[in-house]
Each structure stands twice: as structure tokens, then as C-alpha cells.
Image: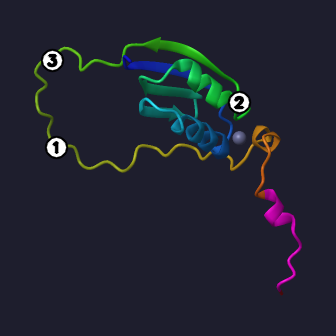
């Protein structure tokens, strides 16, 4: 199967959405690379995996997903015009950190959160 690059739009509201979506696609075979831009809700998958399988897997998590594009994976590209070696930049601190996503969103609660029961049990150990 040919390798291709599939771009999908996925609703990502929180960290849990993100990990559920990543976990769902991780189960698929034929994936070389997964990139998830949680802020924009763009999931990029490179591999021979069938885009339909990706959609099916993500829909199982109860999330909206649609394919925005399917195409050939990025090619190495034409040789770059001689890039003069840059003068050594001073080491940069991390680029500005992404704003943290909330731990959980309404949508995740709908999907069935089993760990909540741990916290609702009254503590009887003390
Ligand atoms: Zn969520």
C-alpha cells in the first residue's frame, strides 16, 4: 500500500480528547507518523493506513472528525539553494509554551469517564 498523508479535522477540547484521539489512531496499523495540533484540531497521519479506518477509529471515541486532505507524503523536496550556514544562534529557550488544555471537557464527560468513580467514593481509611 502506498504511503500517503491524511489530514483530518478533529474536535479537541482538552487533554483527554487529545489522548483519546491519539490512542485511537495508535491502534491502527500502517501508520508511520502522527501529528496532532490540538489548538487547531488538525490531525496529520502519514502512512499506508486507510483514511476510512482513521475516521472510524476516531468516531468511536465520540468525536467529530472529517478528512480535510489526502495526498502524497511530503517529498524531500528539491535541493535547497545553498543555505549559507547561519551564525550560531544563541540557544533559544523553548518557543512559547502552548497554553495548557483543560484537563477535561464536556465532551469527554459524555464519553464515559470511569475514573470519576474513584474520587466519589467516600474515604474510609482515615
Ligand atoms: Zn475533552
Residue located 46% across and 27% down the image: 45
| Label drawn at residue 34 | none
Q: Does residue 73 appear to the left or right of 116 in the view shown?
A: left
SS of the residue at dot 3? Answer: loop
Residue 54 placement (x, y as % from top left): 57, 25
Residue located 37% across and 13% down the image: 72
Alpha carbon of mark 2 to alpha carbon of mark 3: how far? Answer: 40 Å
Q: Which badge, 3 or 1, is on the more N-terminal residue? A: 3
Residue 11 placement (x, y as % from top left): 67, 29
SS of the residue at dot 2? Answer: loop
Magenta stretch, residue numbers: 116-125
Alpha carbon of mark 1 to alpha carbon of mark 2: how far? Answer: 45 Å
Q: Does residue 18 appear to the left or right of 64 in the view shown?
A: left
Location of residue 115 by image quarter: bottom right
Within 10 angstroms of label 1, few (less than 14), some, or many (20 or more) residues? few
Circles 2, 3 touching at the beta carbon (< 8 Å): no
Residue located 61% across and 23% down the image: 55
**Residue tagged 3:** 79
SS of the residue at dot 1? Answer: loop
**Residue tagged 2:** 63
Q: Which badge, 1 or 2, is on the more N-terminal residue? A: 2
Circles 3, 1 touching at the beta carbon (< 8 Å): no
Nearer the camera: disc 3 or disc 1 = 3
Of 41 and 122, nearer the camera is 122
Residue located 83% across and 87% down the image: 126
Alpha carbon of mark 3 to alpha carbon of mark 1: how far? Answer: 22 Å
Q: Does residue 9 appear to the left or right of 60 in the view shown?
A: left
- Taking 13 as reference, is 118 above or below it? below
Query: Looking at the image, in which quadrant does ligand 1 appear?
Result: top right
**Residue tagged 1:** 88
Within 10 angstroms of label 3, few (less than 14), some, or many (20 or more) residues? few
Amino acid at each position: 500500500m502506498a504511503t500517503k498523508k491524511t489530514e483530518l479535522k478533529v474536535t479537541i477540547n482538552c487533554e483527554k480528547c487529545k489522548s483519546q484521539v491519539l490512542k485511537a489512531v495508535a491502534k491502527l496499523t500502517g501508520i508511520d507518523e502522527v501529528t496532532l495540533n490540538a489548538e487547531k484540531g488538525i490531525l496529520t497521519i502519514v502512512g499506508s493506513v486507510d483514511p476510512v479506518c482513521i475516521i472510524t477509529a476516531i468516531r468511536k471515541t465520540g468525536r467529530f472528525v472529517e478528512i480535510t486532505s489526502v495526498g502524497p507524503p511530503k517529498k524531500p523536496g528539491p535541493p535547497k539553494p545553498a543555505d549559507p550556514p547561519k551564525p550560531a544562534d544563541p540557544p533559544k529557550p523553548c518557543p512559547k509554551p502552548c497554553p495548557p488544555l483543560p484537563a477535561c471537557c464536556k465532551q469527554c464527560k459524555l464519553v464515559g469517564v470511569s475514573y470519576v468513580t474513584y474520587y466519589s467514593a467516600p474515604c474510609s481509611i482515615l
